[in-house]
Image: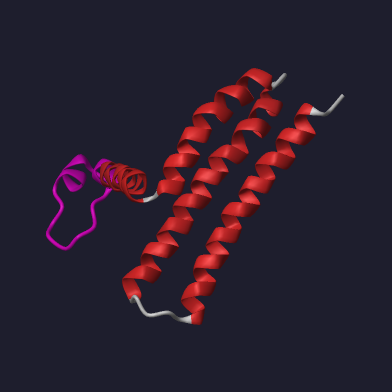
Amino acid sequence: MSGANAASVRPGEKPRGIKRILAACANSWGGFVGAWREEAAFRQECLLALVVIPAGVWFGHSGVARALLVGPMLLILIVELLNSAVEAAIDRIGAERHALSGLAKDLGSAAVFVSFALLVATWGLVLLDP
């Protein structure tokens, strides 16, 4: 792709090249800001990450151990963001109660729970390894 094509995007056309990357970064930043502003669970998990990530780097005796201790915390944040996205989409559909809407929200919550179980199990296995 030439520089001229990347610099000029016609109305209705998706951006390409560096403009696409910058737009994606802006959208991601907006997602982080929205999650921080609207989701108490995400804020709490970010605060937990401020403790868990440095502790994982400190307690890990190798690069692999550090990755195993830090990775699940990052996964919790990822799963929470996806869970929040599901909840927002369900809430956008309507305020009335529906079994499938409740199931979607419960499944997202269960995914967050499993990611926390992974964190606990990983820390236990890595730190208790002789």
| Extreme residue in the right direction | 130
Q: Residue at x 56, y 23 (%)?
A: 54
Q: Residue at x 57, y 53 (%)?
A: 112
Foreground pick, 24 / 37: 37
Foreground pick, 102 / 73: 102
Placement of 126 over or under 32, stated as above or below: above
Task: Answer left or right for 126 relative to 23.
Answer: right
In the rendering, at what x and y percent does residue 86 appear? 44, 63
Q: Which residues are magenta?
A: 1-20
Task: Answer left or right for 17 relative to 57.
Answer: left
Placement of 111 over or under 76, stated as above or below: below
In the rendering, at what x and y percent does residue 87 appear? 42, 63
Colour pattern: secondary structure
- Magenta-colored stretch includes residue 43: no
Task: Answer left or right for 25 relative to 55.
Answer: left
For the C terminus, the quadrant is top right
The count of marks equals: 0
Q: Residue at x 60, y 32 (%)?
A: 70
In the rendering, at what x and y percent does residue 23 appear? 26, 46
Foreground pick, 57 / 15: 57
Q: Quadrant of residue 75?
A: top right
Q: Residue at x 50, y 73 (%)?
A: 102
Q: Quadrant of residue 21?
A: top left
Task: Answer left or right for 24 relative to 3.
Answer: right
- Magenta-colored stretch includes residue 15: yes
In the rendering, at what x and y percent does residue 119 appear? 66, 41
Q: Quadrant of residue 127?
A: top right
Placement of 77 over or under 84, stated as above or below: above
